[in-house]
């Protein structure tokens, strides 16, 4: 039904992220990385410098004091936010397209990606230990849908949906059974093609199956995806079924009370972040 070789070839044909963004991802994943290293890297990329300064001085940055140099902008936003911003700026053209195979209109995948990144940020503000790579993994967790969506004809979608119902499979399990690969694995291949750190690749691959990923990055990316649906539902004034694997909450030390209080804070932050990105 589907040519797996062609699917992987199309994943590898996506344009790479800018070299400075790839290097920034490597720096952010290094626990010994210093702000000066990040600032120096950004300073040699004129386009990224301009966008970063604009973002740091936007109304959403929360400060009335303007910054006029990269070092101050990095200090204001923090390494993790700078990384997430750079990846988002590089991947935004891809993530804004329509993905009809998954029923996603123009911009829908981008908004969901931003919501997932905001979820990670909000979790960190709530005291959850979050590695820098979690922001990037959350932003790109569904990037595999960009390529896989091109191959999902109505016939194949029908097979997947029937397999989910008749065999009681998740979407990922049905994709693996019928296509030989699921969108998380395909997203991991794209992240590898973009030369992103292995932890980011790992988080993307297992964002629906954190138990199989067996790493904190997988738990965080999974939870970010679940919370992103809550954020989007909250913006629409709707409720979305919220069910998190107990093991994930336990390993991350996230109580149910903390999750219950998450919604309003995340929706407010999502609005701020969207303003920041739309200003670039």
Image (cartoon, rainbow, N blue to C red):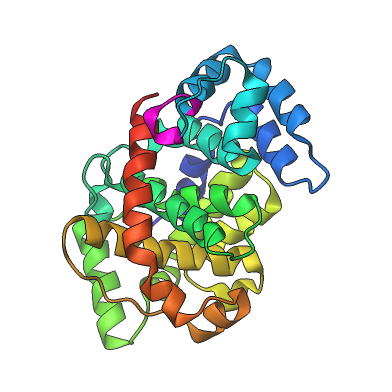
Rendered residue at 53%/36% (across/down): 87
Q: Quadrant of the C terminus?
A: top left
Q: Seen in the image, is 212 located left or right of residue 89?
A: right
Magenta stretch containing residue 213, yes or no?
no
Q: Which residues fall within the magenta stretch?
A: 56-62
Rendered residue at 56%/31% (across/down): 17
Q: Nearer the viewer, residue 135 or 55?
A: 55
Rendered residue at 72%/40% (across/down): 26
Q: Is residue 214 above or below residue 77?
A: below
Where is residue 42, by image quadrant? Answer: top right
Q: Position of residue 57 (x, y in %)?
A: 46, 24
Q: Quadrant of the N terminus?
A: bottom left
Number of marks in the rendered image: 0
Q: Nearer the viewer, residue 251 or 140?
A: 251
Rendered residue at 33%/87% (across/down): 167
Q: Seen in the image, is 272 located left or right of residue 155?
A: right
Name, please, the residue furthest toward the front: 64
Q: Position of residue 41 (x, y in %)?
A: 71, 23
Q: Is residue 181 shown to the viewer in this render?
A: no
Q: Position of residue 11 (x, y in %)?
A: 49, 43
Q: Is residue 13 above or below residue 145?
A: above
Q: Nearer the viewer, residue 236 or 182?
A: 236
Name, please, the residue furthest toward the right: 32
Q: Position of residue 10 (x, y in %)?
A: 46, 41
Q: Is residue 102 above or below residue 190?
A: below
Q: Is residue 227 shown to the viewer in this render?
A: yes
Name, please, the residue furthest toward the left: 237
């Amino acid at each position: 039904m589907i040519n797996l070789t062609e699917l992987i070839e199309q994943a590898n044909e996506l344009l790479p992220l800018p070299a400075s963004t790839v290097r920034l991802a490597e720096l952010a994943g290094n626990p010994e990385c210093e702000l000066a290293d990040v600032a120096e890297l950004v300073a040699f990329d004129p386009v990224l410098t301009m966008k970063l300064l604009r973002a740091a001085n936007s109304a959403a940055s929360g400060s009335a004091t303007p910054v006029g140099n990269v070092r101050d902008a990095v200090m204001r936003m923090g390494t993790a936010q700078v990384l997430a911003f750079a990846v988002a700026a590089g991947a935004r053209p891809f993530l804004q397209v329509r993905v009809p195979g998954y029923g996603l209109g123009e911009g829908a995948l981008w908004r969901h990606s931003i919501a997932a990144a905001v979820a990670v940020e909000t979790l960190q503000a709530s005291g959850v230990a979050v590695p820098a790579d979690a922001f990037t993994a959350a932003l790109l967790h569904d990037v595999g849908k960009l390529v896989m969506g091109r191959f999902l004809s109505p016939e194949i979608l029908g097979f997947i949906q029937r397999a989910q119902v008749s065999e009681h499979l998740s979407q990922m399990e049905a994709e693996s059974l019928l296509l030989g690969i699921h969108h998380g694995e395909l997203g991991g291949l794209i992240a590898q093609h973009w030369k992103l750190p292995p932890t980011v690749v790992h988080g993307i691959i297992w964002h629906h199956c954190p138990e199989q990923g067996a790493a904190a990055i997988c738990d965080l990316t999974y939870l970010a995806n679940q919370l992103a649906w809550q954020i989007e539902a909250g913006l629409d004034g709707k409720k979305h079924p919220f069910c998190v694997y107990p093991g994930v909450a336990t390993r991350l030390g996230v109580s149910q009370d903390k999750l219950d209080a998450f919604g309003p804070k995340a929706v407010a932050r999502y609005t701020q972040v969207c303003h920041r990105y739309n200003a670039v």
